[in-house]
């Protein structure tokens, strides 16, 4: 009796799997496309052309060429050859200043300047502290292909009224305030290269200066200085500076001949963000000092800096030098300097300095540092015991100066910048400050 299979019912089935069967596929040859046959060149053939003459009765052209007259003007800014200004301010101070300079430098350029400013009333006791300043001068340059020959002449006068007078004496109508008038004439001439981009740059100059005040002080100076810079295609560079001065100061008690010679070689090397400078300061000067062993001195110069980034870097320095002092430089610091008994240069035995610097936001620049210096013959000014209207120079044989400084600058644009600097100084005891004639003046005052 047959049974009908129900839907979804699972029945028994048998499957046979054979592993010894191999399927063989016959190889089929690969079809390749045949390269087309390139056309063969036919070589040079002969061509025949037919020329048909056309005879026209046309006369030849008669050309009349003329030169084109056109003014080619250079794009240039409007330059003004000079300016003049006048004014009047507080303390009864008139001002008059004028300058003139040629706008063309082919091949001679020259300039003139004049300035006068006076103060009829000073900050202390009005007329007792009056002063005036006048300067007149000119400069000229002759430009060659690769060098410039330059020179200049100037005359200056400064007038000061001493305001340390007893008010009782000043009320006397017959009393006249003493004025110290300082006159100086300066002449210079030299030569220097123009480009300053080649392997060698140079500048040399000779100068003469004459000075005289209302006292008995006079000083004439002849100088010569030269500077040469060497550049290489690598990171090395060098510099050599030479200066020679002969000064003849005279006062009521002396007439001196002072000589000064300095040679300053330098070598600089730059490796990535590092910069190194090494050199020497060779100085010879003939100042007469008790116990002086030699007129010749040698000081090392070592400088290094590393810029981690634009915002931060550091620098360090160890050096020594001789600061050249003249009567003219002293009187520019103190115009009431009286008869001096001795003029000495300042010896900077060593200077140790270091600090940080950098810039941020591309417009601010900062620098902060400290330095420690040791000096011999560091000069100061002291009131004269003989004449209360004058000052004397005193020297500290050995003085240590500690300095903390900071700078901050702001650049508005490519033309205008603003800078500021703060200096804090600390000196050791000035008990050793000496003056050669101090004891003599004390006995005279007594």
Image (cartoon, rainbow, N blue to C red):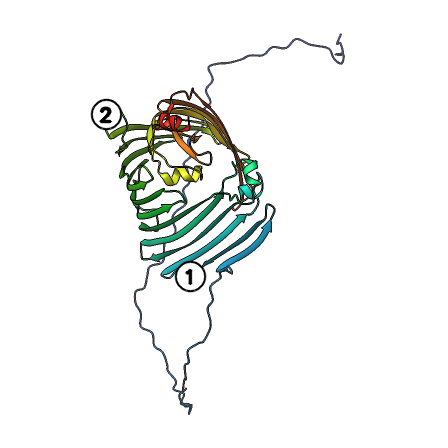
Q: In this view, does 150 lie above or below 385?
A: below
Tell me: 248 left or right of 179. left
Residue 308 on image: x %, y %: 45, 27
Question: Label 2: how many residues lie within 10 Å, few (<14), some (14-19) or many (20+)?
Answer: few
The residue identified by callout 2 is: 293
Residue 325: quarter of image: top left
Q: In this view, does 319 lie to the left or right of 389?
A: left
- Residue 60 visible in the snapshot: yes
Which residue is found at the position 32% from the left and 41% from the top? 250
- In which quarter of the view is residue 315 placed? top left
Would residue 371 appear left or right of 174 to someone viewing this image?
left
Q: In which quarter of the image is the N terminus?
A: top right
Which numbered disc covers residue 182? none
Q: Is residue 255 above or below residue 379?
A: below
From the top left corner, tell me how far across and down residue 288 is, in percent. 27, 31
Could you say where residue 295 lies in the image, as x and y percent from the top left? Answer: 24, 30
Crowd rating for badge 1 (residues with CA inside 10 Å; few <14, some 14–19, many 20+): few
Q: Please identify, in this view, whether the residue under mark 1 or under mark 2 is nearer the observer.
A: 2
Q: Name the residue under label 1.
A: 104
Q: How far apart are marks 1 and 2 (CA)?
A: 55 Å
Q: In what element is the residue under mark 2?
A: loop
> Residue visible at 44% across and 38% down?
336
């Amino acid at each position: 009796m047959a049974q009908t299979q129900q839907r979804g019912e699972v029945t028994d089935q048998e499957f046979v799997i054979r592993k010894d069967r191999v399927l063989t596929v016959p190889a089929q040859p690969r079809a390749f496309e045949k390269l087309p046959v390139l056309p063969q060149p036919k070589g040079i053939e002969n061509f025949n052309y037919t020329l048909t003459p056309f005879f026209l009765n046309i006369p030849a052209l008669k050309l009349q060429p003329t030169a084109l007259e056109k003014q080619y003007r250079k794009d240039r800014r409007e330059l003004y050859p000079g300016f003049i200004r006048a004014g009047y301010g507080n303390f009864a101070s008139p001002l008059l200043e004028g300058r003139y300079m040629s706008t063309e430098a082919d091949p001679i350029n020259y300039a003139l300047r004049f300035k006068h400013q006076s103060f009829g009333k000073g900050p202390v006791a009005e007329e007792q502290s009056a002063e005036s300043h006048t300067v007149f001068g000119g400069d000229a340059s002759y430009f060659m292909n690769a060098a410039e020959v330059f020179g200049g002449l100037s005359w200056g006068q400064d007038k000061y009224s001493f305001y340390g007078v007893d008010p009782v004496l000043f009320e006397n109508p017959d009393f006249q305030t003493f004025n110290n008038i300082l006159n100086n004439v300066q002449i210079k001439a030299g030569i220097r290269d123009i480009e300053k981009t080649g392997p060698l740059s140079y500048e040399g100059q000779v100068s003469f200066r004459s000075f005289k005040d209302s006292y008995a002080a006079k000083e004439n100076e002849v100088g010569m200085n030269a500077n040469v810079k060497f550049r290489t295609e690598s990171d090395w560079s060098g510099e050599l500076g030479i200066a020679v001065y002969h000064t003849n100061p005279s006062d009521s008690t002396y007439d001196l001949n002072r000589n000064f010679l300095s040679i300053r070689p330098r070598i600089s090397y730059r490796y990535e963000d590092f910069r190194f400078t090494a050199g020497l300061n060779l100085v010879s000067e003939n100042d007469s000092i008790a116990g002086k062993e030699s007129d010749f001195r040698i000081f090392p110069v070592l400088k290094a800096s590393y810029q981690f980034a634009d915002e931060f870097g550091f620098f360090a320095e160890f050096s020594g030098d001789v600061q050249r002092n003249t009567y003219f430089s002293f009187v520019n610091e103190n115009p009431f300097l009286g008869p001096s008994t001795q003029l000495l240069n300042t010896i900077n035995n060593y200077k140790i300095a270091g600090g940080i610097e950098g810039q941020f936001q591309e417009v601010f620049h900062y620098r902060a540092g400290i330095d420690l210096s040791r000096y011999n013959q560091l000069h100061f000014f002291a009131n004269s015991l003989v004449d209360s209207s004058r000052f004397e120079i005193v020297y500290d044989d050995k003085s240590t100066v500690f300095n903390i400084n900071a700078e901050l600058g702001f650049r508005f644009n490519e033309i205008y910048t603003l800078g500021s600097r703060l200096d804090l100084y600390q000196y050791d005891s000035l008990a050793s400050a000496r003056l050669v004639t101090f004891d003599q003046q004390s006995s005279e005052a007594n």
